[in-house]
Amino acid sequence: MKQNEDFYFDCILGFFILCPDLINVFLKELKND
């Protein structure tokens, strides 16, 4: 299942790289709670 974990990690890493603005908004929402 190690390959599956790497797949999810790549997806998350790509999400952070491609959607930094969305990440910032999401983090701000978490801090507000």
Image: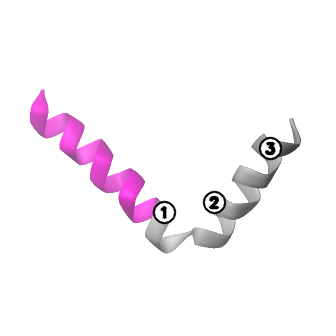
Q: Residue at x 41, y 52 (%)?
A: 12
Q: Quadrant of the N terminus?
A: top left
Furthest residue in direction front, as rendered: 31
* Distance in Å between CA atoms under marks 2 and 3: 12 Å
* Distance in Å between CA atoms under marks 1 and 2: 7 Å
* Position above or below: 28 against 6: below
Q: Residue at x 37, y 58 (%)?
A: 13
Looking at the rendering, the stretch of residues picked out in magenta corresponds to 1-15
Q: Residues within 10 Å of mark 1 (few under 14, many from 20)?
A: some
Question: Which residue in the protein does label 1 denote?
Answer: 16
Question: Which residue in the protein does label 3 denote?
Answer: 31
Q: Residue at x 81, y 47 (%)?
A: 29
Please state which amino acid type lies under the numbered disc 1.
Phe
Tell me the element at label 3: helix
Comparing marks 1 and 3, which lies closer to the viewer?
A: 3
Q: Residue at x 58, y 70 (%)?
A: 20
Instruction: Answer whether labels 1 and 2 touch (C-beta < 8 Å).
Output: yes
Q: Position of residue 16 (x, y in %)?
A: 48, 63
Please state which amino acid type lies under the numbered disc 3.
Lys
Question: Which residue in the protein does label 2 denote?
Answer: 23
